[in-house]
Image (cartoon, rainbow, N blue to C red):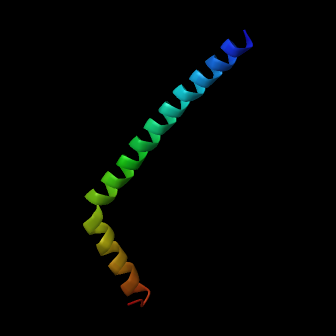
């Protein structure tokens, strides 16, 4: 009975890992997608900030 209980815990841990892994992949895709879609404005903002603060 103890082995069956341990096996169930391993299965639950594996399922949780899949959920977490899937969420992390989705989060990463979202961040990368945002950065790619806003790349030009990010560069413009960075250049403006550098100019404002006297950084070359």
Q: Nearer the viewer, residue 26 or 6?
A: 6
Task: Point out residue 53 in the picture as x, y percentages from the top left corner.
Answer: 44, 86
In the rendered image of this protein, does residue 49 appear above or below residue 2?
Answer: below
Q: Residue furthest top?
A: 1
In the rendered image of this protein, does residue 14 appear above or below residue 22?
Answer: above
Residue at the spot 42% in from the left edge and 45% down from the top edge: 27
Q: Quadrant of the N terminus?
A: top right
Q: Residue furthest right?
A: 2
In the rendered image of this protein, does residue 39 appear above or below residue 7?
Answer: below
Q: Quadrant of the C terminus?
A: bottom left
Left or right: where 37 falls relative to 49 = left
Task: Point out residue 22 in the picture as x, y percentages from the top left corner.
Answer: 43, 36
Residue at the spot 42% in from the left edge and 91% down from the top edge: 54
Task: Point out residue 42 in the picture as x, y percentages from the top left corner.
Answer: 33, 68
Quarter of the rendering containing residue 43: bottom left
Left or right: where 48 falls relative to 18 = left
Q: Nearer the viewer, residue 27 or 47?
A: 27
In the rendered image of this protein, does residue 51 appear above or below residue 12?
Answer: below
Quarter of the rendering containing residue 50: bottom left
Residue at the spot 55% in from the left edge and 28% down from the top edge: 14
């Amino acid at each position: 009975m103890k082995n069956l209980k341990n096996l169930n815990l391993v299965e639950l841990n594996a399922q949780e890992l899949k959920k977490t892994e899937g969420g992390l992949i989705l989060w990463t895709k979202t961040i990368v997608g945002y950065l790619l879609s806003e790349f030009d404005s990010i560069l413009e903002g960075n250049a403006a900030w550098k100019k404002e603060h006297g950084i070359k």
